[in-house]
Structures are given as structure tokens and as C-alpha cells.
Amino acid sequence: MHREGHVGAALLAYAPVGALTLALGFGTLTLLGAGGAVVLAMLPDYDQRVPGLKHRGPTHTVWFALAVGAVLGVLGGLSGTEHGLLSALALAVWAFVVGVATVGSHILADALTPAGVRPLAPYRDRHFSYDLARASNPVANYALLALGVLAAGAALALGNLLAA
């Protein structure tokens, strides 16, 4: 998929996390997570800018998603230490989930294309492709973006409703 599709997929994946975060009363954190999902939506495609890395190779695996989640989890935990251990742990888990969900959504969106992905490589070489639309298909990309924006709007409404 292209940027629009990946941003939509990231917003779609983040929507339940955002709704819960907002319902718990963390509005600023909710916006930070949504922004983070949008910014990180294209991270796996940076493999195209690194010589020697195959596109849809290591950066399109669950291992990469877990690694990004772990890095964000550590950063989240460190940022919460000034508010105590419980806050640090909560922020670590939240940041981990945002990272894994965002990169995971990228992998899933690419699985919609004929080229597909090998998300368990190098341990399993199974290829996943739903062959629904080419990555360059503007209708598919904008449909995913619209779905993500709608999901984010629904999450905002639900989170506010539950917080009230």
C-alpha cells in the first residue's frame, strides 16, 4: 500500500487503544498515540532506503513489530519514571502496544496486495497475500484511509462517552 493506506491502517489499529486511553482520562496521551501511529505508519518501508535490505523483508515481520514495540516501550517506561513505578509500567505497556499495533497494521495492509508479506521470516517462509488490490490502487488506499479516519472518529466519540 501507499502512505494513505498505511496511515488509515495505523489509525484503524490504534482506534481501540485510543478509545481506552481517552476513556481512562488521558486526552493528551491519546493524541500523542494517534500522532505516533501516523508518524510510524511508514516505518517498515524505510527498508527501501537502506542498501542491502530487501523490500518487504525483515522490516515487514512480526519480529520487527515486536522490536519497535520494545524500543517504544522502553522509551515510554523511562518517560514515566518521574511519576512512579506504576506510571512507568503503564506507559511502557501503552507505548509497546502502540508500536506493535502500528507496525502490525502496516504488515497487514501489505498483505492485502498481490506481493504480500512473509511476516514470520526467517523462521517460517510462508507467504501471506489476500490479493485484494495492488499497492498503487488509489481507491484501496483512500478507502483504507477513510476507514481509519472513521475508526478514529468513533474511538474519539466512544472514549469521550465512557469518560463522562
Image (cartoon, helix red, strand yellow):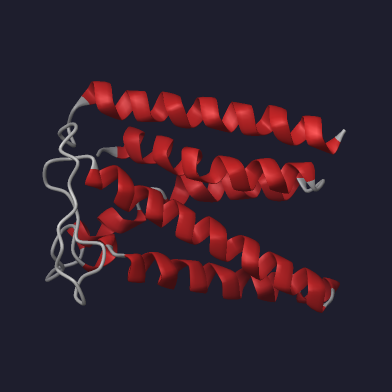
Q: Quadrant of the N terminus?
A: top left
* Residue 151 drawn at (x, y percent): 54, 30
* Residue 114 drawn at (x, y percent): 12, 41
Q: Quadrant of the C terminus?
A: top right
Q: Residue at x 45, y 52 (%)?
A: 102
In this rendering, position of residue 149 left or right of residue 53: right
Nearer-the-camera pick, 48 or 93:
93
Q: How many numbered circles does the render carry?
A: 0
In this rendering, position of residue 35 left or right of residue 56: right
Quadrant position of residue 56:
bottom left
In this rendering, position of residue 130 left or right of residue 9: left
* Residue 139 drawn at (x, y percent): 25, 21
The image shows residue 46, relative to residue 16, as above or below, that is below
* Residue 8 drawn at (x, y percent): 42, 35
Give the residue at the far top of this rendering: 139
The image shows residue 48, relative to residue 1, as above or below, that is below
Q: Residue at x 15, y 57 (%)?
A: 127
Give the residue at the far right of this rendering: 164
Q: Residue at x 32, y 48 (%)?
A: 108
Quadrant position of residue 156:
top right
The image shows residue 60, relative to residue 35, as above or below, that is below
